[in-house]
Amino acid sequence: MKYLVFNSKKEASKEAYKILRSLIDENSTLGLATGSTPTDLYEEMITDYKAGNFSYKNIKSYNLDEYVGISYDHPESYHKFMETNLFDHVDIDKANTHVPDASAEDLEGALKSYQEALNNANIDVQLLGVGSNGHIGFNEPGTSFEAGVHVVDLKEDTIQANSRFFNNDINLVPKQAVTMGIKDIMRAKNIILLAFGKAKQDAIRSLVEGDKVTEDVPCTILKNHPSVYVLVDKEADFQ
């Protein structure tokens, strides 16, 4: 594990993009994340694309998660997030992008299809944020490390944290999500985890300094992965 501390989210994201580019080519497969954490990294990706330095034409992508029960075009759906923050600004083929279908009438069938797609994919780099409670994807504390794609009931602190995207109204935040399982995340060849802000300190401490791998703090499983980069700002640094 490589642990790197930066003065700001912007600086960390610039370095994260350098690392990402060193690990992929124009035919790679990416695991992508949503939320406020990766937005500056996606800006770096867009800027480099517009400068003519990289093409996403043959890139494939698989997203970590999606809220249950909101439509693709809902402004806070992760489908919409990816279009707004990355896909609409680069030359990626939308047919090569994959986000869990969490609004399907046959949700069980949709989970099975996404699991099969992941089983047949070879993700070169998985991008991750981390929750203040240590969740990765939407794998909340207590989730089995052996779980695959599944529906999760979101913890109260996760709902509270995500309410900032829903006019700070927790009643508007979906209470469930579909997520890649931890075993799916661990299959990626490389993992880049970003964490910003004081609320992430405890999770980062458990990951970097703690000696326990525990389902109570899901991110600690990354200790067992052979190629992990952890990039944080000063506020998330526990030292």
Image: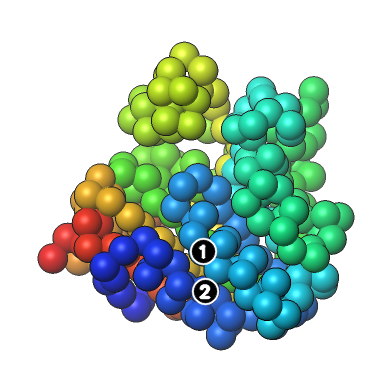
- In the rendered view, would you say 119 is above or below 226? above
- Where residue 72 sits, quadrant-wise, is top right
User: Which quadrant: the C terminus?
Assistant: bottom left
Residue at figure coordinates x 70%, y 72% from the top left: 50
* Mark 1, secondary structure of its residue: helix
Q: Which residue is mark 1?
A: 41
- In the rendered view, would you say 175 is above or below 21? above
- Where residue 140 sits, quadrant-wise, is top left
Q: How many marks overall? A: 2
- Please state which of residues 119 and 233 is positioned toward the viewer in this rendering: 233
Q: Which residue is mark 2?
A: 17
Asked if residue 34 lies left or right of residue 61, the reply is left
Mark positioned earlier in the residue sequence (2 or 1): 2
> Residue lying furthest left in this view?
239
Visual colour scheme? rainbow
- From the top left corner, tell me how far across and down residue 9 is, in percent: 36, 61
Amino acid type, callout 2: Tyr
Amino acid type, callout 1: Leu
Residue at figure coordinates x 56%, y 85% from the top left: 22
- From the top left corner, tell me how far across and down residue 230 is, in percent: 36, 69
Q: In the drawing, what numbered circle is on residue 92? A: none
**For the residue carrying disc 2, how many other residues have a C-alpha within 10 Å: few (<14), some (14-19), or many (20+)?**
some
